[in-house]
Image (cartoon, grey):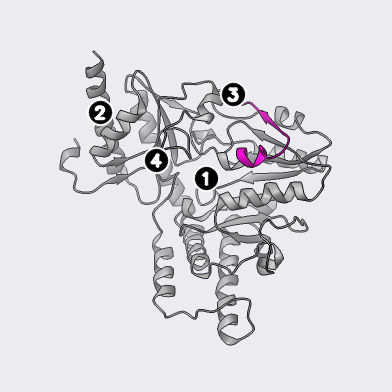
Amino acid sequence: MVDVDAEPTRTYLDAASTTPLLGAARAALLEWYGGTAVVGDPGRLHHDGMRTRVAVEDARSLVASLLGCTPREVVFTSGATESIAAATWGARARDADRQHVVLAAVEHSAVREWADRGPSTVVGVDRTGRVDPDELLAAVRPDTALVHLQWGNHEVGTLQPVAPVVAACRERGVLVHVDAAQAAGRVPLRLSDLGADLVSVSGHKFGAPTGTGVLVVRRGLRIPPLLVGGDQERARRAGLEHTAGIVGLGAAAAELDRTLASVGARCRMLTDRLRSWAAATDGVEVLGADPAGSLPHIVCLGLQGVEPQPVLLGLDALGISVHSGSSCSSESLEPSPVLEAMGVDADRSLRVSVSWANDEADVDRFTVAAERVLAELRALRT
């Protein structure tokens, strides 16, 4: 039995929010900032600039290998939020007569808020959080500029039918954007085979430095850049490249390219352990799809009869970090739009998410602490 009171260190189980740096990324950053690497503007023709350009392009190739696309399709950004903004704005800016956007109700707030800046249609989901591809495609109109569909959900982990939606959108001549922020570095991606027009990726979600990300732009596609003022990234994203972050991103991608299968299996084993605990615990249920239809690192737990705020505080006091509520509104603990769209209780949930840094002992510490906190809170109610 785990004694949570005796644990000297914290247990971090909020990897879907941000993930600890992978060892390769940490080493790359230390080398760069330690002064052993050349620092220069990669857009310059002098020696220092060209050596920095080599570092950026090497990282681009490593990231492309992890994502299964060509290096020329990789545009470095500050993260998935910027990539989503660039994809949505760019798709609309291509044609003034095509401003309509289609999206599923469970998309991330970064997608929803950019969609709201013009005409849009939101398509509902089932109780697992999965959208019906036929319903999504039925919302496409002659003036549709873009269809959004996430690879896997950020709160419940449910996988979406990206392949048939991408294929159907290509047939209709409408652009499709896939939010792969939770999928990249978690499950194998072969984006060249998928054929999506635009794919957004966040580095810090899979062990790369914060402030790093990618917008994959399908070969042959041209969209106006969101950020202008320079010809960086082949005139697709202005501003001096964040070279150190890009080098760290490339190092993380290279490490995961070697270890993705084992990391994914490890995360799945841990979340299966959580699912088994939930099935055996009164007043706790798993929300979302079954393991075969979910990302390997996320489990969303529905709680009966208790509010999430005191549960979070109780777990935090015992050294356990998890998440509850709307993905980007934790400060106010707003109800989850994802769970509301699924038709389940949007006010009482915990999201537990794991990474390469977790093991069975972490999950056991959570389950022991959760049972204790839930029992104490339910005792107060009676």
Amino acid type of the residue tagged 4 in the rendering: Met
Q: Nearer the viewer, residue 132 or 244?
A: 244
Relative horizontal placement of residue 382, taking residue 31 as reference (left or right): left
- Camera-near label (3 vs 4) is 3
Against 198, residue 325 (above or below) is: above
x, y (%) of residue 366?
A: 29, 36
**Which disc, if any, is residue 163?**
none
Amino acid type of the residue tagged 1 in the rendering: Gln
**Which disc, if any, is residue 269?**
4
Q: Could you tell which of marks 3 and 2 lies nearer the N-terminus?
A: 3
Amino acid type of the residue tagged 2 in the rendering: Val
Against 73, residue 170 (above or below) is: above
Q: Could you tell which of marks 1 and 4 lies nearer the N-terminus?
A: 1
Q: Could you tell which of marks 1 and 2 lies nearer the N-terminus?
A: 1
According to the image, label 1 marks what residue? 182
Q: Nearer the viewer, residue 171 or 26?
A: 26
Whether residues under marks 3 and 4 lie with C-beta atoms below 8 angstroms apart, the answer is no
**Which disc, if any, is residue 373?**
2
Against 128, residue 5 (above or below) is: below
Question: What stretch of residues is rendered in magenta?
Answer: 112-125
**Which disc, if any, is residue 126?**
3
x, y (%) of residue 106?
A: 58, 32
Label 1 to label 4, Cα distance in Å? 18 Å
Whether residues under marks 3 and 1 lie with C-beta atoms below 8 angstroms apart, the answer is no
Q: Could you tell which of marks 4 and 2 lies nearer the N-terminus?
A: 4
Q: Secondary structure at mark 2?
A: helix
